[in-house]
Image: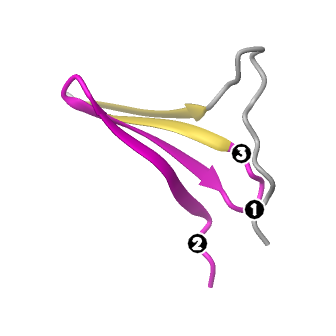
Amino acid sequence: MNKRFILKSKQHLSGGIIKIVVDTQTGVNYLMTSGLGMSGMTPLLDREGKVVVDKPFD
């Protein structure tokens, strides 16, 4: 069974962690944050405001 999400990038920043995860079925990239008592997840956008999408993994 393949994993639905994979970790693309992880960075420690100002006491928190920022991760970029990719949905392997749709290719959509998500920005996840955690730390300092807060967390969140949102689609990652490019400079034109469009969702960043990689080719889906088969």
Determine contact: label 2, label 1, CB under 8 Å: no
The residue tagged 2 is 3
State whether the magenta stretch is mostly helix, strand or loop: strand
Q: Estimate the x, y position of residue 16 in percent, counting from the top left.
A: 25, 31
Amino acid of disc 3: Val
Q: What stretch is highlighted in magenta?
A: 1-28
- Please identify the quadrant where the C terminus is shown: bottom right
x and y percentages locating residue 14 in the rendered image: 22, 22
Q: Circle 2 — which element?
A: loop
Residue shown at 59% from the left, 40% from the top: 30
Q: Is mark 3 on a helix, strand or loop?
A: loop
Q: Does the magenta stretch include residue 39?
A: no
Residue at numbered disc 3: 28
The structure residue drawn at horizontal position 54% and vertical position 49%, both measured from the top left corner, is: 21
Please identify the quadrant where the N terminus is shown: bottom right
**Mark 2 or 1 closer to N-term?**
2
Which residue lies under the disc numbered 1?
25
**In the displayed image of the protein, which residue is found farthest to the top?**
48
Residue 3 sits in which quadrant? bottom right
Q: Residue at x 75, y 62 (%)?
A: 25
In front of the other: 54 or 32: 54
Type of amino acid at the residue the image marks with label 1: Gln
Q: In this view, does 38 lie above or below 56?
A: above
Residue 35 higher or lower than 50, as above or below: below
Label 1 sits on a secondary structure element that is loop
**Vertical order, 6 against 20 (above or below):** below
Residue 46: quarter of image: top right
**How far is mark 2 from mark 1, CA to CA?**
9 Å
Crowd around label 3: few <14 · some 14–19 · many ≥20 (10 Å):
some
Residue at the location (62% across, 66% down)? 4
